[in-house]
Image: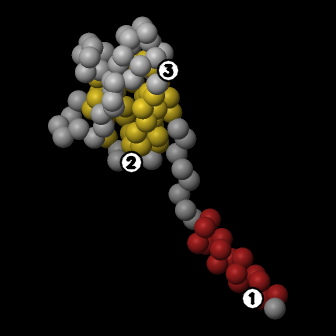
Amino acid sequence: MKRVTLLAFFTALVLFGSAPARAADATIHIDNFAFNPPTLRVSAGTKVTWVNRDDMIHTTVDAATPRSFKSDPMDTDQSYSFVFAKPGTYHYFCSMHPQMMGTIIVE
């Protein structure tokens, strides 16, 4: 009986213990017509959330074509999240204020 319990324990350890850990979440604040931080480096699988702290409506739009992500307009204290599954460099901007730009580097 003891061998069966030990075998079940090691089987569970192999099945569940080898799953990759979820990457930590990251936050970018939109304030004073800027993304802060302007450049963010994260691991693949990280959920990035943009939070609008400005008094104006802003968006977060992937600069690439086709776009990987595009938020709806965010009013004050609204947010938008996207999970970056693939490594690469992602440039983004606010479609309402194109001078606002940022970069996410996914490793």
Which residue does the image show at 50% across and 20% down from the upper left?
77
Mark 3 sits on what residue?
Answer: 77
Q: Position of residue 67 (x, y in %)?
A: 23, 38
Mark 3 secondary-structure assignment:
loop
The reply to whether discs 1 and 2 touch (Cβ–Cβ < 8 Å) is: no
Q: Position of residue 103 (x, y in %)?
A: 34, 27
Which residue does the image show at 46% across and 40% down from the upper left?
47
Side (left or right) of 50 relative to 11: left
> Amino acid under label 3?
Asp
Quadrant location, the C terminus: top left
Mark 1 sits on what residue?
Answer: 4
Mark 2 sits on what residue?
Answer: 85
- State which tag comes first along the sequence, 2 or 3: 3
Residue 51 appears in the rendering: yes
Side (left or right) of 2 relative to 76: right
The reply to whether discs 3 and 1 touch (Cβ–Cβ < 8 Å) is: no
Count of marks overlaid on the render? 3
Nearer to the camera, 97 or 101: 97
Tell me if mark 1 has few (under 14), some (14-19) or many (20+) residues whose alpha carbon lies within 10 angstroms of its own: few
Q: Position of residue 100 (x, y in %)?
A: 31, 15
Q: Quadrant of residue 14?
A: bottom right
